[in-house]
Image (cartoon, rainbow, N blue to C red):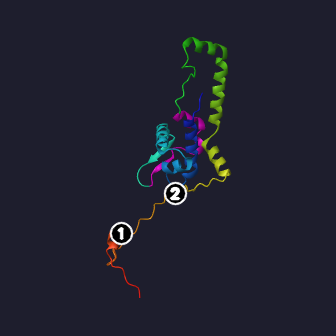
C-alpha cells in the first residue's frame, strides 16, 4: 500500500473542512488559501470525495462543501481510498515470475502489513483529527490571511500647461533675457 501526497492532502483538506463547517458550507478557495494547495487540485480531490459520498456540495453564492456524514462516522481510511488509486496487489508492475517469487518468499509479510495499516487508518476518525487540531489551538472560524496585493506605482498627475512658460529647450532660447536693475 502506498499513500501518496494526494491522500495526505485529502485528509488534511477534509480535516480543515470538518473544523470549519459549523454553520455554512466551506469554499474550496478558503481551504486552498489555508493549506497552500492549488485550487484546481483541491477541486479534483473533492470531486472524488463527493463521488465516494464523503462530502456534499452547494452551488451558488455562499456555496462550498460540507461533510456528507458526521465526522465521527468518517475514517481516514475512507478518505484515502476515495482519492488514491490503490491496487489490490502492489506487485502488479513486476513480471509474473518475479512477482511469484516475491509472493512466495514474503507475500504474507506484505499482506499482513497492509492489513494492519488499513486497520489503523480505519480506527482513526475524522473527529479524532478535528479534536487534535482544536487542542493545538486552531480556531474554527479562522479567516485566511488576506493575500497581499502588489502596490502599484501612483499614477502621475497630468501636467498642467502654464501660460507663457516655454515647453522645450528651444522655446526657452527664444525668450529675451531680462535686464537686471
Left or right of residue 148, residue 170 in this image: left
Q: Name the residue under label 2.
A: 148
The residue closer to the viewer here, 47 or 72, is 47
How packed is label 1: few (under 14 Cα within 10 Å), some, or many (20 or more)? few
| Residue depth check, mark 1 versus mark 2: number of the one nearer the observer | 1
| Residue 26 seen in this snapshot | no
The quarter in which the C terminus is drawn is: bottom left
Picture layout, residue 50 above or below residue 179 = above
The label shown at residue 169 is: 1
Q: What element carries label 2?
A: loop
Secondary structure of residue under mark 1? helix
Q: Which of 58 and 70 is in front in this view?
A: 58
Who's the residue at 49% across and 57% down the image? 150
The span shown in magenta is 62-83
Work out whether residue 49 or residue 180 is closer to the camera in this orientation and state it.
180
Q: Residue 78: say if magenta.
A: yes
Amino acid at each position: 500500500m502506498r499513500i501518496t501526497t494526494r491522500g495526505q492532502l485529502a485528509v488534511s483538506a477534509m480535516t480543515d473542512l470538518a473544523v470549519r463547517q459549523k454553520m455554512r458550507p466551506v469554499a474550496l478557495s478558503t481551504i486552498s488559501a489555508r493549506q497552500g494547495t492549488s485550487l484546481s487540485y483541491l477541486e479534483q480531490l473533492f470531486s472524488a470525495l463527493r463521488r465516494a459520498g464523503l462530502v456534499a456540495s452547494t452551488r451558488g453564492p455562499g456555496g462550498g462543501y460540507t461533510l456528507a456524514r458526521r465526522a465521527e462516522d468518517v475514517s481516514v481510511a475512507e478518505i484515502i481510498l476515495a482519492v488514491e488509486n490503490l491496487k489490490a496487489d502492489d506487485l502488479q508492475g513486476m513480471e509474473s515470475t518475479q512477482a511469484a517469487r516475491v509472493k512466495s518468499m514474503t507475500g504474507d509479510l506484505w499482506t499482513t502489513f497492509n492489513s494492519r495499516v488499513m486497520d489503523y487508518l480505519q480506527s482513526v476518525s475524522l473527529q479524532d483529527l478535528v479534536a487534535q487540531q482544536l487542542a493545538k489551538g486552531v480556531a474554527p472560524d479562522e479567516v485566511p490571511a488576506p493575500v497581499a496585493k502588489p502596490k502599484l506605482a501612483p499614477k502621475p498627475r497630468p501636467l498642467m500647461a502654464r501660460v507663457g512658460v516655454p515647453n522645450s529647450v528651444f522655446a526657452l532660447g527664444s525668450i529675451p533675457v531680462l535686464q537686471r536693475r
